[in-house]
Image (tube, rainbow, N blue to C red):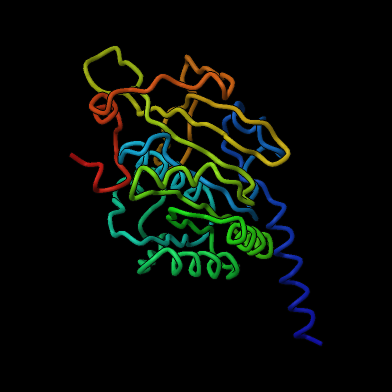
Amino acid sequence: MNALRETIRRIEAGRKRASAILPFGVAELDTRLPGGGLAMGALHEVAGGGNGAIDGAAAALFAAGIMARTKGPVLWCLTRPDLFAPAIAQAGLSADRVIYVEAGDETSVLTCFEEGLRHGGLGGVVAELGRLSMTHSRRLQLAAESSGTPGIALRRWRRQADASDFGQPTAATTRWRVSVLPSAPLPVPGIGRPRWHVELIRCRAGESADFEVEACDAQGRLAVSAELADRSIQSGAARLGSSARAADAGAHGYRTAVA
């Protein structure tokens, strides 16, 4: 009888966590998301706006900022040991909270991703993936719902041709794309806080939108710049030259992004 009560308690706790919401704390973003923030017990996708390391690093920092605002250890699954931990810490996700799993291939990453989501004792799971099929994404979504643990599929590609997979349908609740913008000008010589162009490409029970925000601070929080422009997803944003973006990128998420 005690075992049955414990099983029921865990199921109820998982349901409560699955329905929980993690707000960004930025009204312009939260009002576009059902419930006023990111669904905790759900799968989300994040990718860089371009195929270069700079936008890819911004996407990693965006994911780190989300996980920084959860509670508990964070499992980060990857195939390449090129994550720059000090930059992740600057985005609010301290090193003592992260458990890194270096898998040999993406099949192993997917296995670790799903097991981490089903565990129920983690603050969240991030997995770096090039491909994500509808079948695998459904399994991940169900695993996240069962435990109430948020999962982020951080999309990375070794070849530019593989980036087209990001346009394929998945079961993810939201899909985001992050690009680097020039930092805000300062009244004195120097470089201001990094800024991002964040696109909400897909949102279940919501609408697409895009935003200009200041990058994550030491608590993983985004901020709205004074000249925030909330435009339609069709308007897009002007692409910057790689050298200009590298100068304004600030702290980078991957070692390959550091000059």
Query: In the picture provided, is 146 more to the left or to the right than 247?
Result: right
Query: Which image quadrant: the N terminus?
Result: bottom right
Horizontal arrangement in the rendering, residue 208 relative to residue 98 (left or right): right
The quadrant holding residue 97 is: bottom left
Residue 29 image point, x, y percent: 59, 31
Q: Considering only vertical position in the picture, is 103 above or below 224? A: below
- In depth, the one of 12 and 247 nearer the eye is 247
* Residue at 46% in and 62% down: 75
Quarter occupied by residue 78: bottom left
Q: Quadrant of residue 252?
A: top left
Spot occupied by residue 129 in the image (x, y as percentages of width and height): 44, 55
Give me the residue at 31% from left, 53% from top: 83
Q: Residue 6, how many percent across, how many down?
A: 74, 78
Q: Position of residue 179 (x, y in %)?
A: 41, 32
Q: Nearer the viewer, residue 187 or 87?
A: 87
Q: Residue at x 24, y 46 (%)?
A: 256
Answer with left or right where residue 101 lies relative to residue 172: left
**Position of residue 117 in the picture relative to residue 49 (left or right):** right
